[in-house]
Image (spheres, helix red, strand yellow):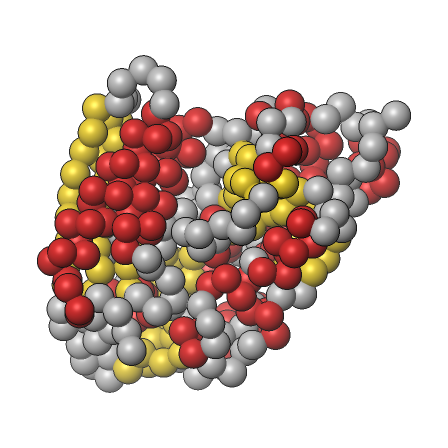
């Protein structure tokens, strides 16, 4: 008899949609009969500190680890066996004893522009109100449009869309991947080019995290998507070099062109007036592709860090 594989996830609608996809994929890979999925691959909902904080940016409360800490604690003490994270929420440093065991195929990594009246950032009138909780999106938007009023917008996807509908904002920015996974892709008016404005490292990708001893399970290997993992490794290399968190406006986007990884990394001051950027590419040798991509990211991130100096960190 297959022992239960307990799957831990945040309790938001988006997290449940993502973890539900992974629950079905894990069950299929583990050979669980469809009528036993809920019993043998149960979802365990965990409310994180990041979910409870809705009145301020995460920069003011401790950073993105607030979305993973309680779930990682559940892994370490055995209450769950696999955690499903949005990769962009996973900090560069991981607790001892845990590992990213699989990275499934990525969704759209781009940021989505959503508005009732306007088609894109360039169409907004001077002084328009743009909503986002991301310091990176704020900085990139102000770099392109310093005349905009960028205001904090926290809450789940439905809450943010409702505030747009109620007229609190002229437009908002969200991750395209989350909207697509929720079946809400129809609200997207346009997507922002990921090379011109790199998204958060790992955006659009999911991470399946386990205890190190369980990371080699066959069902996890079956869900790992090598091209996605290579690109994410490059982006997280940059994340590591920049020590980026919700305290810094940093974007990284990698593309795989055959055997060549092309990586764009940028950092910005919070108001968008200062901007540092690096574009590199690497032809991958056979074997150890993820490690090679990670080193590319490290080198790119270090270059941006040298350019930025003390300008990188938001006080």
- How many marks can you see? 0
Question: Is the C terminus in the top left, top right, bottom left or bottom right quadrant?
Answer: bottom left
**Lateral position of residue 79 relative to residue 200, left or right:** right
x 46%, y 60%: residue: 187
Q: Is residue 217 above or below residue 126?
A: above
Task: Check the image and report above or below for 84 versus 218.
Answer: below
- The image quadrant of residue 47 is bottom right
In the image, farthest residue toward the right: 1
Query: Which residue is more in the foreground, 158 or 29?
Result: 29
Look at the image and tell me whether residue 70 can be seen: yes
Q: How far from the left and from the top, in percent, is residue 231?
A: 35, 36
Q: Nearer the viewer, residue 191 or 304?
A: 304
Rendered residue at 51%/70% (across/down) = 161
Residue 118 visible in the picture: no
Tell me which corner region of the image, top left, top right, bottom left or bottom right, holds residue 147. Answer: bottom left
Residue at image position (32%, 37%) is 294
* Residue plotted at (54% across, 78% down): 54
Residue 36: x and y in percent read 85, 34
- Front residue (pair 216, 131): 216
| Residue 227 picture location, percent across and down | 39, 28
């Amino acid at each position: 008899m297959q022992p239960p594989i307990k799957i831990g996830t945040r309790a938001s609608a988006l997290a449940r949609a993502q973890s539900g996809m992974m629950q079905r994929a894990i069950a299929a890979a583990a050979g669980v009969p469809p009528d036993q999925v809920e019993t043998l691959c149960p979802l365990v909902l965990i409310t994180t500190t990041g979910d409870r904080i809705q009145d301020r940016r995460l920069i003011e409360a401790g950073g993105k680890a607030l979305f993973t800490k309680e779930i990682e604690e559940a892994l370490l003490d055995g209450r769950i066996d696999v955690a499903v994270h949005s990769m962009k929420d996973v900090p560069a440093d991981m607790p001892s004893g845990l590992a990213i065991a699989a990275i499934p195929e990525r969704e759209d990594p781009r940021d989505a522009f959503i508005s009732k009246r306007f088609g894109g950032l360039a169409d907004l009138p001077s002084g328009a109100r743009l909503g986002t909780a991301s310091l990176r999106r704020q900085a990139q938007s102000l770099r392109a449009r310093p005349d905009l009023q960028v205001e904090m917008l926290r809450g789940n996807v439905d809450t943010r869309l409702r505030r747009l509908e109620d007229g609190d904002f002229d437009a908002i920015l969200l991750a395209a991947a989350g909207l697509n996974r929720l079946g809400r892709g129809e609200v997207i008016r346009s997507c922002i080019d990921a090379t011109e404005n790199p998204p958060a490292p790992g955006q659009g990708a999911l991470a399946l995290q386990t205890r190190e001893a369980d990371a080699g399970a066959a069902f996890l290997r079956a869900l790992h998507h090598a091209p996605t993992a290579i690109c994410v490794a490059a982006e997280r290399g940059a994340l590591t070099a920049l020590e980026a968190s919700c305290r810094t406006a940093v974007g990284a986007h990698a593309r795989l062109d055959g055997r060549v990884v092309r990586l764009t990394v940028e950092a910005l001051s919070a108001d968008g007036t200062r901007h540092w950027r690096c574009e590199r590419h690497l032809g991958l040798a056979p074997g150890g592709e993820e490690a090679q991509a990670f080193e590319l990211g490290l080198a790119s991130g270090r270059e941006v860090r040298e350019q930025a100096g003390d300008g990188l960190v938001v006080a």
